[in-house]
Amino acid sequence: MRQRALKWLDERLDLGGIRGFIAEKTVPVQRHEVWYYFGGLTLFLFMVQVATGILLVLYYRPSAEEAYESVQFIVAEVEFGWLIRNVHSWSANLLMATVFIHLFSVLLLKSYRKPRELTWLTGVALLFLMLAFGFSGYLLPWNELAFFATKVGTGIAGAVPVAGTFLMRLLRGGDEVTGATLSRFYGLHVAILPAVTTALVALHLLLVQRQGMSVSLKDEHRARAGVPIPQRPFFPNFILRDVMLWYIAVGVLAALAAFYPWELGRKADPFAPVPAGIRPEWYFLAMFHTLKLLPNHVLGMEGERLGVMAFGAAAAFLLLVPFLDRRASRGEDSPLFTVIAVGGLLYLVVFTVIGYVAA
Amino acid sequence: MRTCAIALLASLGLGSGAAAQTSGSSPNECVRCHEGLPEARLSAPAAAVKDDVHVRSGFTCVDCHGGNAAEGDAQRAKAPATGFRGVPRGAAQIATCARCHSDAELMRRFSPRQRIDQAAEYAVSGHGKRLAAGNATVATCASCHGAHGVRFASDPKSPVHPTAVAATCGTCHTQRSDYEKSVHFHALTKRGDLSAPTCNDCHGNHGAAPPGVDAVANVCGTCHAVFASKFAASTHAQIFTCVECHGNHAVSPSSDEMLGATAPGICTPCHGGADDLGFATAGTMRSQIERLKASIAHGEGLVERLRLSGMSVRDQDVALDEARNRLVQARMEVHAFSPSSQVEPVTSEGLQILSGVERAAQRLLVELRFRRRGLIASVALILIVVGALALKIRRLERRGDV
Amino acid sequence: MSVPEIGKGAPATPDVDGRRRAFLDAVLAFGFVSTAIAIVYPVSRYLVPPESEEPATASVVAGKLSTLAVNSGVIFRFGSKAGLVLRTPEGEVRAFNATCTHLDCTVQYKAETSQIWCPCHNGFYDLAGNVTSGPPPRPLERFAVNLRGEPGDEDIVVSRA
């Protein structure tokens, strides 16, 4: 039956090339193999977000008057609405975690080195897109925490030098966070970001397929010394492992949805005072807490502005890593960048923890 | 009096055409002269009449004071031949106003809905009786309504607008400070509820006098009808009135603490001791109400928690409203002051509704737990698949495909 | 025949191995199918509109016209509040927020006098929602009423004005 279907398609589309590619594609066997699955896992979780997101869109209403009530409706009245919503919220967090793990594994394994600089650039762009997804999506339930987190977050955008006020007004759809902000964030979250992300993911995957899986520097040295790198067929071995990991992810999501369901919170009241200890979700926490700790004025500039500029510089640095790390491009060991990567990771972890404990 | 009336009617007949236009067209030397006078007592009326309802309807100074409005010279304008009466005071003032305001045919031409019995009412009021007995300081028409610059009572700037009545009466009566502490005053001025009572709603308008002791309950009962009817049937009605517990001017918000023998309960002055039936009844009613209140609070907490967890609690919201209704009703039933009052049945109804809420809340909690179990079952399924996949991969690779 | 030891490194006889493989494949197939159902079933139930079609912040169906007799009134749920839908003696359908403006008790329709009555403190409203006697300070909030559906089987749709 399967053969007949494939034959039917083959007669029309000439699947020979693809079938050959899949049958022959191999993946190097690695010592640090587990890290190589996180890209696929990130993609899977993103697909989960798209699927649950589309389902939520069928009932959600993006206006300040109805958003909270529509989420309440989904969770309380729509059958299994609570499940879809919980999966979407938890998967978002899991997705951010896998994105960071994927980023740091690539960074530490130096897979960004030549010839994979383009893959790296698209990857970092995807990281920023995921952060934008998280920030925009968080506001949509229009509850107290989300409203004030958005107020504070867009306020920080106002600290960008030169274009800060303009940027803040652009994000907020006005001077304050209002229903206009909600409309804007909704358009971003369900239309603009998905479109751009789809294009970049396609490019990212195309590059990975074209160039094949990277190997660690050590294996590359061994290969150059004449020791061949053992290979494993992509299909079915690697794929099955991928699928196994995806199933584990689904299991984790189901367990989280069962034991730690997300609360609705209280409906946002723009005229209420900011609740004490307001803070963003964990993936923004390190950045937020750093800004909080900066003194009011540093070097004749507002502390917050300096912090924002520093983060901008860090983002630029991240983008340019493959071009800055000359040694890795030449295939040599690059301990400096290892130290920088570890330092960055430690900073994020420590400040996230401090941010949590401080509240 | 009659000649003045005829003269007035004649001048009205002449002036009615002019009255349709602004008052500036017919000469008013009174105003023109008085507004330029340095003494405030003499110039203020001239300024005030510009806002006066009488003036807007075409009446002028001479209609109340007499005199000649066309005469520029002060002495000739007020010569005795002109019928100048000066400032009417006391009974003369009543008569001046009543000349028009008790004339049905005249009032019908200007304000058909207005009553024409104010003077008659005044005559039997506390003020009127004292005036007749020779007290010259007592309030008369102008004391409350003003003399110049009179506005309709519905005008918020009028001294007899509901929100201003207490201040107007308070210029003589000290009860004003008590009243301004009351819930009625708060409702009137802070909540904008113009149906809340002020001085004239309980004492009467022009026929104002304190209600007699046997009439107090009726007066309160014009609004608080149900309480009054319950109370009237109780033994308390034979002994005292609403005022003894709730006050008359400084009516403060009632609270459940008033019911009971322990302070701040107000039953103790008469009821005391465990063998006093009233004492026991008060205690019982109070405990029933407190039980309902506690049960409502508990139900509200449960429902709120479920709401925040995302469960559908709209039916429970409606039920909680119903339970709160019972609480309101129970507090009303207290006024029967009897062991056979309806407090117990009403609170029981409320408690029953709340146990329904409790049961529904438990069902929702069970639903939450059921979801949890369903998801755990899914997790178990997933683990089976993961285990099978792991084995499959191992088989594939052992066969030497690596 | 040696007892098959599942999990041991050494390969078993082809016969047993075949059965083991079949068993594993069967478990895998069962697993895939059941997890697929565990996903497809909730999603398909989710897509079916629930009974209360909307968050009901704006409008709600209060009942059928045919069940509302002339000179009668019925309490219905509007969101999480009570509403009163009534039919005047002349047959017109009207709807109000059933929360009395005095102390929030639920009002009811009094057919004997064709008035709306609050049992808590004897407040009376006329059929336009205006207070005619008793303590309520404001008229009842009035809702908009529309009839929808086949003649003879109309729904009474109540919405915030």
Image: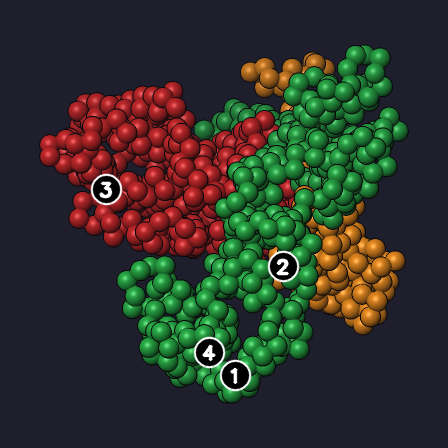
Q: Position of residue C33 (x, y in %)?
A: 66, 39
Same chain shared by disc 1 and disc 2 = no
Front label number (3 vs 4): 4
Nearest to the eye among marks 1 and 3: give it.
Answer: 1
Q: Which of the chains is red?
A: A
Identified by mark 2, the residue type is Arg
Amino acid type at circle 1 is Ser
- The Cα–Cα distance between marks 1 and 2, rounded to whole angstroms, is 57 Å
Type of the residue with mark 3: Ala
User: Depth check: A9 or A186 in front?
Assistant: A186
Closer to the camera: disc 1 or disc 2? 1
Q: Which mark is residue A159?
A: 3
Q: Nearer the viewer, mark 3 or mark 2?
A: 2
Give the farthest residue toward the left: A299
Query: Which chain is orange in the picture?
Result: C
Residue at the spot x=71%, y=31% of the render? B244
Q: Chain of mark 4?
A: B
Subunit of label 2: C
Does the rendering let one see residue A349?
Answer: no
Circles 2 and 4 on the same chain: no
Per the model, the C-alpha gap separating discs 3 and 2 is: 43 Å
Q: Is residue B35 left or right of residue B119?
A: left
